[in-house]
Amino acid sequence: MKTKFLILMAGILLTVTFGSIHSFAGEVEILVNKLVEKEILNPVEAQIIMDETKQAIANELSQGKSVSTPGWVQKMTFKGDLRLRYQWNKKEAKVERHRGRYRFRLGAKANVVDKVKVGFGFCSGGTDPRSTNQTMTNTFETPDLRLDYAYMQWSPKTWLDFYGGKSKRKAIIRQNSDLLWDSDINIEGGAFVINKSCGMKTDLLISFGSLVLDESSSDISDPVMYFSQAGINWKIGNSFSLKPTITYYDAYNVKDDSLDHSEGTNSLDSNDCFIYDYNVVNPELELAVKTSCSKVPYFSLFGGYASNLDPDEDNEGYLFGLKFGDKKVKKKGQWQFKYTCRQLEKDAWLDTFPDSDFYGGKTGVKGSETILQYALAKNVILGFDYYCSEKINAPVVTEEILQVDLLLKF
């Protein structure tokens, strides 16, 4: 056996010296098969060697120690997706619209030094922070590719992270719905995130920080948003989990000012400036169940409430929903159904942030959303999303949207 491994190691040494990491594993496999053919190795020994070789390569890459691959490649991980969409819009007293749309995103994360990472991503779309969609139009016009996020993540403890720059919002502010935040919005500023196990199958979730909303060159009254969030993730036995959270938002220097990308549905003065502060309390709750049914392995009920403490009326919002099927839709055959109903009054929340597909991201609206997703293959997902929404107050105008998506992840 010793002689066999000496012969094998000599072959591997030549492969490493003159080959690249991308072809290394394949060349080792060819070499091992040849040794099996010559009866120098038996099939069991060959499989053991191949498994150990693949594991060693994976360990080298994860530790940035491979001599055959540039260091910057070993420090980075990439991911992305392409979404193709057919969209139908129908609003009362307006002509139906049929649109072809697509979205492309590419992101990466790099290890800089121990406990410090940099993340960045690019996406299609324009300057609207609530949309990365690109509509098929303008005679094959070449669209833009923009910076979606670019942030530093410092992790001084395993349970503590600091984010600075333009960060991925979902990693910092945890929400079970898009009642307040459109899923495409990424935030700018700094924040701390704590995710610490407290024993008894309970994780403590805390985040707080300061977000920049706008910058003025003429004075120091820049609109900012301070936020703090606390919650727990409590696993009850092997089947149930309960996740209550409460978030407080303090939009500072927003009153008597205006914000870009506002829909103009909040209460405004004669200069189109906000007449209220937006100090919003947002409790949420989710109950999830892992079932024993193989066809419906997951079920959850969730909801949230929002109240702006400044005005005395038109200052509340809520969302209730359920979902069942698979918890995540990734592998072939996995599926999920989701239904939500919501109401967001005129001054419950800044109208620059809610889901842009739900009545254009406006406030003073109510309605429902129905989603069905099915994985045609691994990372190939077919989705149907139907919105039915309307204004709360007269004149009541109903809008319907149907989106048919094909999502490809890589």
Image (tube, rainbow, N blue to C red):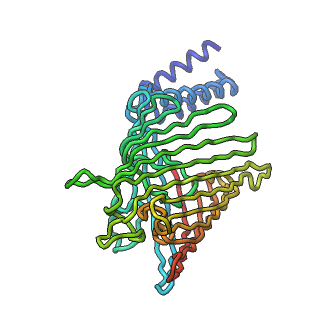
| 62 up-or-down from 191: above or below | above
User: Would you say residue 320 is visible in this rendering?
Assistant: yes
How far across and how far down the image is residue 187, in percent? Answer: 40, 50
x%, y% of residue 42? 69, 24
Q: Position of residue 3 (x, y in %)?
A: 60, 13
The quarter of the rendered structure image containing the N terminus is top right
> In the rendered picture of this protein, how many numbered marks are placed on residues?
0
Q: Residue furthest left?
A: 218
- Residue sitting nearer the eye, 393 or 262: 393
Front residue of 10/378: it is 378
Choose between 298 and 228: the one closer to the eye. Answer: 228
Q: Is residue 384 visible?
A: no
The residue positioned 51% from the left and 84% from the top of the image is: 92
Residue most toward the top?
2
Residue in view at x 40 percent, y 55 percent? 123
| For residue 223, side relative to residue 98 (left or right) | left
Give the residue at x 51% y 45%. Answer: 229
- Going 54% across and 54% down the picture, which residue do you hit? 282
User: In the image, is residue 268 above or below residue 78?
Assistant: below
Taking the view exactly as shown, the residue that stands out farthest to the bottom is 93
Q: Please, which residue is most extreme toward the front here?
A: 312
Front-most of residues 228 and 111: 228
Q: Position of residue 270 (x, y in %)?
A: 31, 73
Residue 76, located in which quarter of the rendered image? Answer: top left
